[in-house]
Amino acid sequence: MARNYHVHLLTLAQVPTLVRVEGEWPDPITLSTGWFRARARPWNDQVTEPMIRLDRGGAEFLISVTRRIHELAGRVCYSPALFGSSSRVWLRSGFEPHAGLRIMERGLNPVASVASDIEVTSNSDPNWEAILEVDRASFEGFWSMSREGLFEALMTNRAHTLLVVPDNDAVAGYAIVGSQWGVTYLHRIAVHPGWAGRGLGRALVGEAVRWGAANGGRTMILNVRPDNHRAIALYQRTGFTDTGTELTVLRHQSG
């Protein structure tokens, strides 16, 4: 018991030294103190500042993790995109809103037809370099994703799939879809700019809707940047409506 009391009396300046770090930055790392755990990796291949995922723990643990991250990787770090209720612990830990994403949804029962004659396949062993090539061509800077980020998105839900529009040995477009507890998530969708305007986005959304309904989904949700008017128009044409809610990425800057 004496040891536990000693730990509780430590100042916040001393707490980061108790955070155990597994791995070596800039590779993905795990940070823990007892039962509490967080993970961090570079935001993406272009924005190399850390993104922290808080698996278990409250504001004091997040403060200590953030200080440790600043020691390892610089002055700026980010949260994942969070719903408002999940943001509270981050706000109490000194993070501030940085970027927002609109949430759109549609029902999956009954499934409205999204007709397309474009071939879309489900790929359990994807060519990640080809997927990354499409993503890098479709998104720039902060909103692009690394291979680690794409794999995290794929593995978020128990049931998941990667939908691909093949282009010979390459990829023309892809979508990452997951389903859990009656909700299907369109986590990521991208079409190579060289294939823009040919209906690939509509075909991928249509196949995602059919997959979601077949895997127990009653509702499908997605997020989109408020200034991505072309994507918003596509989603509206395929049955999605704005929910009036947002996800927020938060940012922390030291000293």
Image: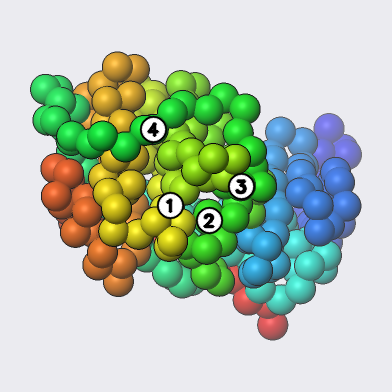
Tell me the distance, in whole angstroms, between the alpha carbons under discs 1 and 2: 6 Å
Determine whether 134 is above or below 57 in the image.
below
Closest to the observer: 115 or 111? 115
Secondary structure beneath disc 2?
A: helix
Q: Residues within 10 Å of mark 2 (few under 14, many from 20)?
A: many
Tell me the distance, in whole angstroms, between the alpha carbons under discs 2 and 3: 9 Å
Closest to the observer: 51 or 133? 133
In the displayed orientation, state which residue is furthest to the front. 168
Q: Amino acid at mark 2?
A: Asp
Determine whether 184 is above or below 236 in the image.
above
In the displayed orientation, state which residue is furthest to the bottom. 255
Mark 3 or mark 4, which is nearer the start of the sequence? 4
Q: Which residue is mark 1?
A: 190
- Please state if 236 lies on the left or on the right of 126 as rendered: left
Tell me the distance, in whole angstroms, between the alpha carbons under discs 3 and 1: 12 Å
Q: Amino acid at mark 3?
A: Ala
Q: Quadrant of residue 126?
A: top right
Q: Which residue is mark 2?
A: 135
Residue drawn at x 78%, y 67% is 73
Q: Which residue is mark 3?
A: 130
- Mark 1 vs 2: CB contact within 8 A: yes
Secondary structure beneath disc 3?
A: helix
Mark 2 or mark 4, which is nearer the start of the sequence? 4
Between disc 3 and disc 1, the foreground one is: 3
Residue drawn at x 49%, y 33% is 162
Q: Which residue is mark 4?
A: 120
Residue drawn at x 81%, y 58% is 26
Q: Position of residue 44 (x, y in %)?
A: 64, 60
Q: Which mark is residue 97?
A: none
Mark 1 or mark 3, which is nearer the start of the sequence? 3
Determine whether 165 is above or below 72 in the image.
above
